[in-house]
Amino acid sequence: MLANVLLSLALACSASAAPLVAPSFPTVAKRDNSPFNITYSSPRNATYDSLPRLLIMATGGTIAGSSTSNTDSTAYTAGAIGVAALVEAVPELLETAQIDGVQVANVGSNSLSDAIALNISKLATKAVCGDDAPYDAVVITHGTDTLEETAFFLDITVNCSAPIVVVGAMRPATAISADGPNNLLSAARTAVSPLSRDRGTLITLNDRICSAFFCQKTEANTLDTFESPEFGCLGHLLSVQPFYHYPPSMPTFKKVYDISKVQSLPPVEIIYGFQGSDFHLVKSAVESGAKGVVTAGTGAGSLSTAGQPLIDSVIAQGIPVVRSTKINSGFVAPSTNATTIAGGVFNPVKTRRMLQVLLALGKTNDEIRAAFEEPLGSYLTQF
Ligand code: SIN
């Protein structure tokens, strides 16, 4: 009981100087939201009818985290607060959009399964793609630990112009200077901005707007952690208003895949490279059911001489092995006669998502190689 009272107080304080406002208009009739299992609809207010329609999918994470101490940023419970409380803690959201909320999950993002990621992608497509789509934009609240994995997955599987924005926070909702409320308002305003269309899935944290294709978590603890090394961010927010540095464009190497008929994502393991590694875990991965393997290799994706025979033995069984780099930045270029596939521009977790999608669509190993290697390879061979 006391914890609940503390939590309400902290949410109210952390969101803005304004206290939580009880809805003064009746809650609107719900739209045709049967596929979405809506658990929250924002109250009708004076501006409601003129506002864009926004679906917020909440999945948990630190943005929904709670602690009994307002200085705790390490031992709190992630995924403790529901979507309604997240929205109600930021009254400005009610002037931003007509909001429906769905609680897709409420867990730390390290526990989000492939099945949930698939569900989020299909729900997002239903929400905003097609002429009769019931929403104008989607925001997904998500733990930051694996945020880039879901965001990238959405970026390569949701095929329409509507904005999809993934957002998290580095401090729990109960912390002094919690970053969640500002990030959530940033995400909502970014999502409903016409400037955000045709940019693929976006990530907003700490006043930056990044493309999910390149954006990644770069620091384990600080607020200023989501960045796109080498590629930069697409835009910023000032006074919680989004603006972009360039007109809409898509990454050169991006392709979007139709996964509407995919029922599950095949298991793909990531194996880390290091000095003297013999990659013996590749064998265990395949024995325990992996349908593909990604190596987070050294440097530009190199594998040890000792590891190569074992890797070749799983490739001989028909298992694709895609090389990425543990550096988490830079490129793994195709090389002639390699038995492994070069991952190109993707870091290990994004390579894993891409391989899962290609395997789920029944692509052959040659097609998988082409999907990873041709975009970068076509540039390398043109002179
Ligand atoms: C999580 O990823 O669920 C916990 C960490 C965070 O959201 O920052």
Image (tube, rainbow, N blue to C red):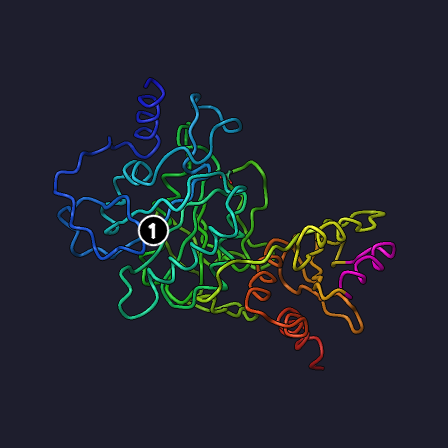
Rendered location of residue 298, percent (x, y): 76, 53
Snapshot quadrant of residue 86: top left
Secondary structure category for the residue under label 1: strand
Question: What is the quadrant of the C terminus in the image?
Answer: bottom right
Report the front residue among 80 and 119: 119
366 to 99, vertically: above or below: below
Rendered location of residue 200, percent (x, y): 44, 63
Rendered location of residue 44, percent (x, y): 15, 47
Residue at 33% x, 17% y is: 2
Badge 1 local density, few (<14 within 10 Å), some, or many (20+)?
A: some
Residue to which mark 1 is pinned: 241
- Spot the residue most to the right: 306
Rendered location of residue 56, percent (x, y): 34, 49
> Is residue 382 found left or right of 62 in the rendered image?
right
> Is residue 345 found left or right of 61 in the rendered image?
right
Report the front residue among 284 and 121: 284
> Is residue 343 found left or right of 62 in the rendered image?
right
- Spot the residue most to the bottom: 383
Residue 200 shown in magenta:
no
Residue at 45% x, 45% y is: 142
What's the magenta bit mostly, secondary-structure-wise? helix
299 to 158, vertically: above or below: above
Q: Which residues are magenta?
A: 302-316
Report the front residue among 178 and 243: 178
Question: What is the quadrant of the N terminus in the image?
Answer: top left
Q: How many marks?
A: 1
Snapshot quadrant of residue 20: top left
Name which residue type carries label 1: Gln
Residue 314 shown in magenta:
yes
Q: Is mark 1 within 8 Å of ligand 1?
A: no
